[in-house]
Image: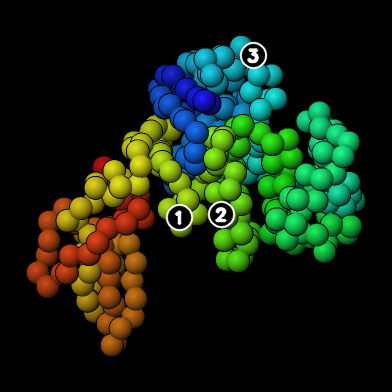
Amino acid sequence: MIHLEIQNVSKRYARNKYGIKDFTMQIEKGILGLLGPNGAGKSTLLKMIATVHKPSSGIISLNKNNIVQDPNYMRKQLGFLPQDFGVYPNLNAFEFLRYMGAMKGVGGPPLHERINQLLEGLNLMEAAKKPIGSYSGGMKQRVGIAQALLNNPKIIIFDEPTVGLDPEERVRFRNLISDLANDCIVILSSHIVSDIDTIADKVAIMKNGSLISYGNQDQMVQNVTNRVFETSIEKEHLSSFKFQHTVVSTMRKDGKLLVRFIADQPMENAINQKPNLEDAYLYLTKKK
């Protein structure tokens, strides 16, 4: 059984400026979707879990081992794709992954087999002998995903992994992650709800460096039960409508706008809608 515990963790940059403040969470095997707007502190939290940064206070432990005091315990079991991942442009994918494997202490026939498996799974085999500098942004991102998985890690952290991926690549990535989550912890950070809602076992929502909600998706969605509506408005009324309500989406229909929105009280002519995770995310992050 693998268990990650974050206890009262804070990251302070200045006297009254915190990236993370009093953050507590327990994470078990499976996929955790970490949601939050840009600047919520997601990357700061992930870098502390990955032992790239040290917390200013608090404890992070893996299987009861304090990884702030013993970072190598985490690093031996970690696969990490940071948001600002870089590659060596003159190396091809095979060369780069062999190099990263050596850095992680993996080599020989098992590494060669693992590289082939990952390149095949991420649809990179055709371009694997071309310099990475010639790759598109989405292809470079897929190489980053591959290096995170090289050492068959028990803790896998992806920070905004689907940036630059087209819809087909996003589906392939989600399928790959679902296959990995049987015996490890996968933390998938994103501000795009659709990256999370199809695969996450649990969801954590952050705002301003704090954890504001944590649970399974059904528990999240309960926050907006009987609070999601749809109505039709004139296009010129959209700005004032947004001022009064949290608008989830708009669609043109018969010369008007069909608006899906969140409100604590129903309004005249609005039709109650079945809520989803995106509704809950917007409700929790927008409310004061």
248 relative position to 30: left or right = left
Looking at the picture, how far across and down is residue 111, in whole percent? 82, 39
Q: Is residue 242 visible?
A: no
Cβ–Cβ under 8 Å for marks 2 and 1: yes
Q: Amino acid at mark 2?
A: Arg
Which residue is farthest bottom? 254
On the image, numbered disc 1 is attached to which residue?
Answer: 198
Which residue is farthest top? 69
On the image, numbered disc 3 is attached to which residue?
Answer: 70
Residue placed most toward the observer, 201 or 148: 201
Q: Amino acid at mark 3?
A: Asp
Name the residue: 36% across, 55% down: 278
Q: Secondary structure at mark 2?
A: helix
Q: Is residue 203 above or below residue 168?
A: above
How far apart are the two marked residues, 1 and 3, measured between alpha carbons? 35 Å
115 relative position to 183: left or right = right
Closer to the chain start, of discs 2 and 1, is: 2
Looking at the picture, how far across and down is residue 46, in whole percent? 56, 33
Dot 1 surroundings within 10 Å: few (below 14), some, or many (20 or more)?
some
Dot 3 surroundings within 10 Å: few (below 14), some, or many (20 or more)?
few
Which label sits on residue 174?
2
Q: Is residue 112 above or below residue 57?
A: below
Looking at the picture, how far across and down is residue 62, in whole percent? 55, 21
Q: Amino acid at mark 1?
A: Thr
Q: How is the image coloured?
A: rainbow
